[in-house]
Amino acid sequence: MTDGLKLLAEDEEDLGIISAHVQDAITRIGDLVYLPKNRRFAALINRYCWEGCGDNAIGERRRAGLHFNGVLKVKALNVRQNDPNAVVEMLMIKFTPMTDGAGTIDILLAGGGCIRLEVEAIDGVLRDMEEHWPAAARPRHGVETP
C-alpha cells in the first residue's frame, strides 16, 4: 500500500471534501457495485489528483476506492448500464437531507447522469489504492481561462 488520501465522510462538510477530490474521476460502469445485504455502494475510480500527486505538468491520476455504508437503495438516472465497459466521469457528490440524518447522496456525472443513493446517514470513505501515473490530459471546465 502506498501513501495517499484516506478520507472519511460523516457529515455534509466531509462529503464536500470527498466531492472535491473525486471531481473529474473516471470509472467503468462495471467498477460500480451495490451490495444490498451489506448496505454498501462501492466504486473503483481513477481520480484526477487536484492536490498534486507528482511533478507532471499535465497532472496525475490515481486508482482509489470510494464507498458508502448504510445504503438502502440505489437508482441510476440517465446512466447506460447495459455495457460494463462504458466509462463515466464524476463531476460532484452532493447530499440532500431528509429526516433523522437520512437523505440522498447524488453522484453527478458528466452528460447529465446521476447515481442516487438513499442512505441512513452520511458514512463514506475515499481511499487511494495505488501509485499515481501521468494523466493523458488535464480536465478542463467552461469556467477556466485558456
Image (spheres, grey):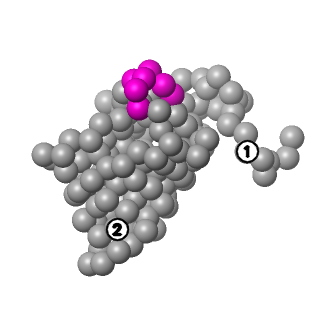
Q: Position of residue 77 (x, y in %)?
A: 46, 47
Label 1 vs 2, first from the N-terminus: 2
- Residue beneath the point at 42% across and 23% down: 83
Residue pushed farthest bottom?
Answer: 100
Q: Position of residue 8 (x, y in %)?
A: 34, 56
Nearer the observer, 125 or 54 = 125
Question: Could you tell me the amino acid type at mark 1?
Answer: His
Q: Seen in the image, is 102 located left or right of residue 112?
A: left
- Tell me the distance, in whole angstroms, between the alpha carbons under discs 1 and 2: 29 Å
Q: Is residue 144 visible?
A: yes
- What main secondary structure does the magenta stretch of the protein show? loop
Task: Please name the residue that numbered disc 1 is placed on.
Answer: 141
For label 2, the SS is strand
Nearer the observer, 38 or 83 = 83
Quadrant assignment for the N terminus: top left
What are the residue bounds of the magenta stretch?
81-87
Question: Could you tell me the amino acid type at mark 2?
Answer: Gly
Q: Seen in the image, is 76 located left or right of residue 141?
A: left
Task: Please name the residue that numbered disc 2 is placed on.
Answer: 103
Q: Is residue 24 magenta?
A: no
Quadrant assignment for the C terminus: top right
Q: Position of residue 123 (x, y in %)?
A: 29, 59
Q: Nearer the viewer, mark 1 or mark 2?
A: 2
For label 1, the SS is loop
